[in-house]
Structure formats: C-alpha cells, structure tokens
Image: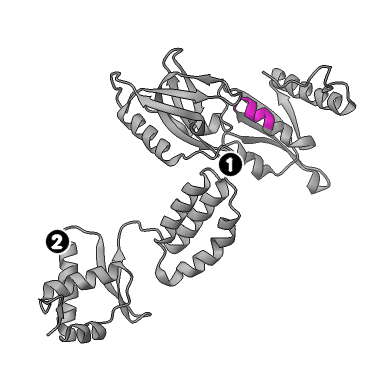
Amino acid sequence: MYSFGGVNVESSAYRQLYILNALQKHAQLTKTDLAAHFETSPRSIQRDISAINTFFEDENIDQRIEYNAAKHSFELQIKTHQLTNAQILVTIKIILANRALNATETTELTDALRQLVSPDQRRLVDRIINIESLDYSPLQHNQPLVDRIWDFSKFILNGETVHIHYGSRLQQQSTPDILPKAIFFSEFYFYVIATDLAVKEDRFYRIDRIIAYSRLNHPRVTAYTNRYAEGELRKTIPFMYNGPAEDIVFEFWGIEEAALDRLPSAQVIARHPHPNPARDSVTIRAHASDKGLKMWVLSQGNMIKVLSPQHFVDEIKDVIQQLQQLYAGDIGQEDGEQPHFFI
C-alpha cells in the first residue's frame, strides 16, 4: 500500500496524475521504477499510460506519452509546434544581437526561453550564451518596451485611437491623437505606424520615445479598415523614414547579395564583367526614397554610384562636396558655415 499525506494513493487516478505531472517536469520515468514506486505491476503502469493517452485523444489535446528507446524512459510528446532546443537557442541569440530591449527585459525574456530547453541540454545552451549575455549592451534609450508593444498591439486589433506624449530626436515634444495601424521593427527600434488624426497622415513613432499614452473614447474602426501592408512597406521604406517612393538606379561594386538583402525591392538590371572578377559591378534598381536610403548609399563609400533620378544624384554630390570642404576646414569651423544634410 502506498500513501501520501495519510491519503490512500493506490488508485489509478492518482498514479496517472503523478505520471503526467512528472513527465511535464521532464522527469525520467521507467515502467519498472513506477511499478516499484507504487507497489503495483508494470502492466498496471502501462494501463495508466494508455488511459492518459486515451484522455488526450478524447479531449483533442495534442500530447502523447511515448517510450524513448534511446533513453529507456517515457516522454511527453507535444504534437503542436513546440520550439526545439536549437530553435530556442537561435531565438535567444537573435534577441541578444538586435539589442532592442533594455537589460531587464532581455534577461527576463531569455531566462523564460531558457526554461523551455530540455533539462539535459540546458547547461549546454547556458554555456553558449552566457558570455554574450554578460556582455549585453542595450540601446541608449534604456526604456522598457514589452508592455508598450503589447498595449499598442491591442489598440491596433481593437481599432482604438490613442493620445500620446511623444519626444522627437531633437528633444521636441508633441501630443498628437493617433490611430495606430501596425507595429514595425527596423534598425534596432520598434515603431508604431499610425495616422496623425489632426493632419490625416500616416507617420512613424519610435515606441521608446512615447513618453505616455492613453486610450481615447472615439468610435472604433474595424480591423479590415485599419489594416496596413507591412510587407509592402518593408520593400519601399527599408530605413523607417517616410516619404514617396520612386525608382533609384545605381551601379554597385560591393557585395551584390548585401545590397539586395538590404533593399528588398532591389533587382539587378545589368551586369558589367571585368577582366579582374574582383572588379565586376552590377546595375541595380530599387523602388525606394528616403533619407535612410541616402545614408546607406553614402555608407558604401566608393563602391556605389547613383545614376538616377537626377535630384538624388545631386543630393549625393552635395554631401560629398561638403565632406571635402569639411576635411579641408572650409566649413565646420565654430564661427563659419556648418555642414547640412539633405532635406
């Protein structure tokens, strides 16, 4: 007779609950050990496991107890899309690499993911990511974002308007009423794309710069009306600066794959072989136009030459000229002309 807390636990119901709870905690269970533990026969243990599996089937629960021959023990198999240990590791490394969350939220999130790793592999995962975790360097804003992202996601789903207190990069503050449409991540930062109700224009707001927000008692819009084509946005505005899109054509001597990955709308329209393959170039067309694209073009140094449109070419030339003047000391002096960026 087996007892627990003075209660007779000989019944199969208790055994089944015990087995299920132990397997959920990744305990190593064998039929022989369970039979000895409960002073019953291995056949009774097998009936218990069959009863649990029948319950899973009857209730449409995507779980099943299976025997792992390699480990000589039973395991609880989850039929749904449960993350594998490798997938959890990759997810943690992505979180650490993009630096989007502050140190506290990153630790909370990665610790929660680590708990999903099977116990026999958890130490290995810890060893892989411990150094990266210790050296984690969050972004300068150091703002908590998880709850804000959750709240704005619900605003979007419910079609609700919101009053925000927003601080721009120039420390200017505004208090617009907005209709959030989408949450977007790009270049380290989370953005909410929303319609400014005063000017009826869609604008991008960095979520870390939203100082405060409150839901407005306005009529809700339907999710269909409020939908936003995020996939198309990524193709035409890859750098999160709003503005009309147009075809930009440039010759490129750098790594072709890097340019095509950075500009999702880009296509190679011509190839220019050179006797020295290291000097091959391609002509690329991309459908985009914003300050971020110009910054990327300038970051490529002498590996890129913009061909059209002409205003884009002229703006790049202007910045290059200013660079020459800046290093020559003709501009940038305390009492003289200062460099300016394109508008």
The secondary element bearing badge 1 is classed as loop
Would you place residue 75 above or below residue 174 in this image?
A: below
> Which mark's residue is nearer the viewer, 1 or 2?
1
Looking at the picture, tell me which residue is in the foreground, 65 or 215: 215
Q: Quadrant of the N terminus?
A: bottom left
SS type, badge 2: helix
Image quadrant where residue 336 sits: top right
Q: Are marks 1 and 2 in contact (CB under 8 Å)?
A: no
- Residue 94 lies, in percent from the top left, at 53, 51
Residue type for callout 2:
Asp
Residue 58, label in figure: 2
Q: Amino acid at mark 1?
A: Leu
Residue 134 percent across, percent down from the top left: 58, 57
Relative horizontal placement of residue 47, taking residue 83 as reference (left or right): left
- Mark 1 and mark 2 lie on one chain; the one further toward the N terminus is 2
**Residue receiving disc 1:** 139
Q: Residues within 10 Å of mark 1 (few under 14, many from 20)?
A: some
Is 264 placed above or below 134 here?
above
Task: Name the image quarter holding the C terminus.
Answer: top right
Residue 48 placement, left or right of 155? left
Residue 174: give x, y in percent of width and height. Answer: 50, 19
In magenta, the rendered stretch is 288-295
Based on the picture, tell me whether residue 27 belongs to the magenta stretch.
no
Q: Residue at x 30, y 29 (%)?
A: 158
The Cα atoms of the two marked residues, 1 and 2, are separated by 50 Å
Residue at left 81%, top 27%? Answer: 323
Give whichever of 50, 26 is nearer the camera: 26
Q: Quadrant of residue 20?
A: bottom left
Q: Determine the residue positioned at 32% across, 74% down.
A: 27
Colour scheme of the picture: one colour
